[in-house]
């Protein structure tokens, strides 16, 4: 019996403009703590849309979403921001690092926003994460001076800073070459196996998905296999 | 928490420091112009007001020539219940001098609201010059009191004011009058009073008030000489000019004295109401120009912040994705706008002060204003405070709408768009 971290119940979403198009229907599944889940499916099957609903950034859907047992419906925008800050770590296809800040500050930002630890502690923790990902040497460089693979590792470090319940990834290896893809995958694998970090990764890379512990396959807005 | 937002705001600002600088210069320019304009305008106001107001008594006590309000028939018991119609009431030959001056002086000396007073005798005379008789007026004054309260000394451009007291039977002529009489210092002029008294007086000085019409007819002598000239005793006075500590109390005190001393008393506000109107209009104009300048600067800030938001879409999106709320993003942009306002405003008042000092040192010589050497400037701190407040209010307004827009950016559309 493991702990349920995220639970989606009968999630539906449609676009109404110009005609009603159903994008997601009857999405029901649960993610347990420590699972390394990948969501696969063809382009346009709605897997990214689902991810953004699960991430609380997209609020226009029907159905219920529970994160850490809390119902996300009817929460205010600022409350959802707190949920994202505390429980969810993001890794996107594009790194989205802030060029105005150095690497360490980029990693620290969500931690400072959470305001749970003092600035020194957050800095220390950020350094730990960077060390874990093997990029501690780059900590004081500007984000723009890093290579693509390094940037993606920094954004993984940023997603880890608040010890989130779950890390969500939207094609995190989509922009990387094979070598870097492998490095990123190994990091995810290590997080899952060594640190029991829960991960939910959207990808269309079959080989990536094949190595995860659970695969959710989608087609035409429905889950066809899980 | 807000420290973090301020830090982010600072980094965003510094990343586009050139645009920020341009925006801040806009604010600086308008605030400095605002401060300079107000200082200069009010300096001019003070100068023009001072031209009249500084030389005018706040309360003037005198006896006006007018028909008596109490006609004899109204006092009669026999016709008490009747309406009495009297046509063509004339002024009687009542005396112009103030009654009981000694008692008035005693009261004035005790009154704590009063800065000082100067007695005066006002008389119409003829200046005889060859066969010509030029009309004019002569004021018997106490030079020391008059100089202290009404800066009489400053307007004496030739000779010494104090000689009026030291030299017996002396006179100081208005510049225009002196030219008309071709009288220089040391010359003697003949004075004819309306009663027919003739008296030679020695010219010891020339004064220039800045009002040409006044300089053509006015002249000054000592109180004692004026009494002698009029053939009156040494308690004869026609005016007592009172200067108050607070000019705004003048109407109230004037009423009080008129009742107390049973004479006429006129306050400065009634006597010179047109000056206040002029000052008010000039002040309104300067404020209007200043506000317009600030609004223009505000549009500049609005534009720059809008551009910044388009450039920083990614940053806003990721901040929101990692847990910053719309409110936090809004605050960041408000902080950016306000810091432009504060720095622009601060430099604005510094430059405004600089410009004021420069204007204050530009020579401004005009024959009608002998005491003025440079352009007048009023360094009142109020203008600087208003300038800072204005700059912050305008930049806040300019930042508000872009900030609201930024707070409403949907991170999903931006992140998925890549």
Image (cartoon, helix red, strand yellow):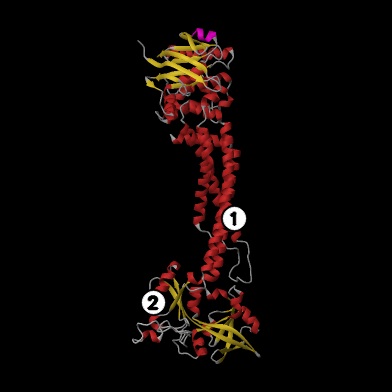
Q: Residue at x 37, y 77 (%)?
A: B260
Q: Residue at x 54, y 34 (%)?
A: B12
Q: Chain of mark 1?
A: B
User: Visible in this render: residue B372?
Assistant: yes
Residue B61: which quarter of the image? Answer: bottom left
Reading the image, the residue beneath label 2 is B259
Q: Which residues are magenta?
A: A206-211
Outermost residue toward the left in this view: B77
Q: Secondary structure at mark 1?
A: helix
Comparing A22 with B225, the one in front is A22
Q: Where residue B400 appears, x then y in whole percent?
A: 51, 39
Q: Where residue B249 appears, x then y in whole percent?
A: 42, 68
> What kind of secondary structure does the magenta stretch mostly adopt?
helix
The answer to whether marks 1 and 2 mark residues whose Cβ atoms lie closer than 8 Å is no
Q: Secondary structure at mark 2?
A: helix
Reading the image, the residue beneath label 1 is B355
Residue B25 inside the magenta-drawn segment? no
Q: Residue at x 48, y 71 (%)?
A: B270
């Amino acid at each position: 019996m493991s702990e349920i971290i995220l639970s989606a119940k009968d999630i539906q979403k449609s676009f109404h403009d110009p005609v009603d198009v159903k994008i997601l229907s009857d999405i029901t599944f649960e993610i347990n703590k420590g699972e390394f889940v990948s969501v696969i499916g063809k382009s346009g099957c709605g897997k990214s849309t689902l991810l953004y609903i699960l991430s609380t950034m997209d609020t226009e859907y029907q159905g219920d979403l529970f994160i850490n047992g809390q119902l996300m419906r009817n929460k205010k925008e600022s409350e959802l921001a707190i949920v994202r800050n505390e429980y969810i770590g993001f890794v996107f296809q594009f790194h989205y690092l802030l060029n105005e800040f150095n690497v360490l500050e980029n990693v620290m930002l969500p931690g400072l926003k959470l305001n749970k630890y003092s600035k020194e502690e957050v800095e220390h923790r950020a350094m730990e994460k960077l060390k874990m990902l093997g990029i501690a040497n780059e900590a004081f460089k500007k984000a723009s001076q890093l290579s693509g693979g390094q940037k993606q590792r920094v954004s993984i470090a940023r997603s880890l800073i608040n010890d989130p319940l779950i890390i969500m990834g939207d094609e995190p290896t989509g922009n990387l070459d094979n070598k870097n893809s492998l490095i990123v995958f190994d990091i995810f694998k290590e997080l899952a196996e060594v640190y029991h970090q829960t991960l939910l990764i959207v990808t269309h890379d079959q080989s990536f998905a094949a190595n995860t512990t659970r695969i959710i396959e989608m087609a035409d807005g429905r889950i066809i296999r899980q | 928490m807000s420290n973090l937002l301020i830090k982010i705001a600072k980094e965003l600002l510094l990343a586009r420091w050139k645009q920020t600088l341009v925006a801040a210069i806009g604010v600086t320019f308008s605030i400095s112009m605002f401060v300079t304009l107000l200082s200069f305008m009010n300096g001019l106001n003070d100068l023009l007001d001072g031209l009249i107001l500084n030389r005018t008594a706040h309360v003037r006590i005198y006896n006006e020539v007018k028909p008596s309000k109490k006609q004899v028939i109204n006092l009669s018991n026999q016709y008490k219940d009747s309406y009495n119609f009297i046509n063509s009431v004339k002024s009687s030959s009542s005396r112009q001098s103030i009654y009981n001056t000694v008692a008035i002086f005693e009261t004035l000396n005790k009154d704590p609201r009063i800065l000082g007073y100067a007695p005066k005798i006002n008389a119409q005379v003829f200046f005889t010059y060859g066969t010509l008789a030029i009309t004019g007026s002569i004021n018997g004054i106490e030079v020391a009191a008059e100089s202290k309260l009404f800066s009489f000394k400053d307007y004496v451009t030739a000779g010494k004011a104090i000689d009026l007291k030291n030299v017996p039977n002396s006179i100081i002529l208005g510049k225009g009058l002196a030219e008309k009489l071709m009288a220089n210092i040391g010359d003697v002029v003949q004075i004819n009073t309306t009663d027919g008294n003739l008296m030679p007086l020695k010219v010891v000085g020339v004064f220039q008030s800045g009002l040409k019409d006044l300089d053509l007819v006015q002249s000054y002598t000592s109180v004692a000489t004026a009494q002698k000239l009029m053939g009156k005793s040494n308690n004869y006075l026609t005016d007592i000019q009172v200067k108050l500590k607070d000019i705004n109390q003048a109407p109230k005190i004037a009423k009080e004295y008129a009742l107390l001393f049973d004479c006429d008393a006129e306050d400065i506000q009634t006597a010179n109401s047109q000056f206040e109107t002029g000052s008010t209009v000039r002040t309104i104009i300067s404020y209007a120009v200043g506000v317009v300048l600030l609004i223009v600067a505000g549009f500049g800030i609005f534009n720059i912040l809008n551009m910044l938001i388009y450039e920083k879409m990614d940053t806003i999106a990721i901040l929101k994705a990692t847990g910053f709320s719309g409110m936090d993003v809004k605050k960041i942009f408000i902080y950016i706008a306000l810091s432009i306002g504060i720095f622009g405003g601060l430099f604005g008042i510094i430059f405004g002060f600089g410009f004021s000092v420069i204007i204050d040192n530009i020579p401004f010589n005009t024959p009608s204003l002998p005491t003025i050497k440079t352009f007048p400037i009023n360094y009142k701190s109020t203008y600087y405070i208003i300038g800072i407040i204005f700059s912050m209010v305008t930049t806040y307004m300019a930042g508000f709408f872009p900030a609201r827009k930024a707070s409403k950016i949907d991170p999903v559309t931006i992140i998925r768009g890549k």
